Amino acid sequence: KIEHNTRALVDLLTPVGVKVVGITKATLGKPEIGAAMLRGGAAGLGDSRVSNLSRLSGLAGSASRTLIRSPMLSEARDVVRTATCSLNTGAAVLKRLDEAATQERRIHDVVLMVELGDLREGIAADDVADAARAVLGHASLRLIGLGANLACQNGVVPTDKNMDVLTTLVTDVESAHGISLDRVSGGNSATLEW
């Protein structure tokens, strides 16, 4: 059923250019659930706990494992060992991730989270340019995208207006730095109606 449901989402979203990341936090990173999501076509897996991502690391086809929250300073080394990507909001954490990734001889992917009204997490839209420049200044970090978490804490749902803000920020970062961002994350299943 998990594979079937994942396939249904993938089939619905692929034609509009959206990739699905299967989130396993409700099952504590159970490998069987992650494997079913990957068989169903999920582009990668995500979880809010490093220990759960570790359980998923041996799955075939799970090249992308995303920590779907900003890491704690104390877990930076475990994050770069376990997660291929993390969602981030703070300069101190990014610095620590860069140091850990350098020590581990790895490149760690970063998605900067932008606050678009739900007041759950994210940097202010006006600070995105500086934050992107900071990530690009770290040798062992790679800025791969921007994201926003909506409909999670305070009921602010995805709309044309707030998604346009995110899209404009992506375009501005790409133009300013001559890069192409691979991920623009508009949120979770609450985005489906939008």
Image: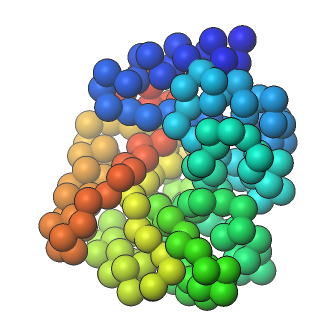
Residue in the picture at 66% in, 87% down: 103
Side (left or right) of 20 relative to 45: left
- Residue 129 visible, this orientation: yes
Instruction: State the residue in front, 71 or 137.
Output: 137
Quadrant position of residue 142? bottom left
- Taking the view exactly as shown, the residue that stands out farthest to the left is 175
Left or right: 100 in relation to 167 = right
Picture coordinates of residue 192, whole percent (x, y): 44, 25
From the viewer's side, name the closer residue of 144 and 74.
Answer: 144
Above or below 116: residue 91: below
Front-lying residue, 88 or 41: 41
Residue 42, compared with residue 184, is above or below; it is: above
Image quadrant in which you'd find residue 25 = top right
| Vertical placement of residue 157 versus 107, above or below | above
- x and y percentages locating residue 61 in the rendered image: 62, 39
Is 117 situated left or right of 22 in this image? left
* Quarter the N terminus occupies: top right
In the displayed structure, 181 sits above or below 44; it is: below
Q: Return the x and y of residue 106 as percentages of the image width and height.
A: 58, 74
Quadrant where the C terminus sits is top left
- Which residue is painted at 83% across and 37% down in the image? 30
Q: Residue at x 51, y 20 (%)?
A: 9
Whether residue 165 appears in this view of the structure is no
Give the quarter of the image for residue 38. Answer: top right
Q: Position of residue 135 (x, y in %)?
A: 42, 79
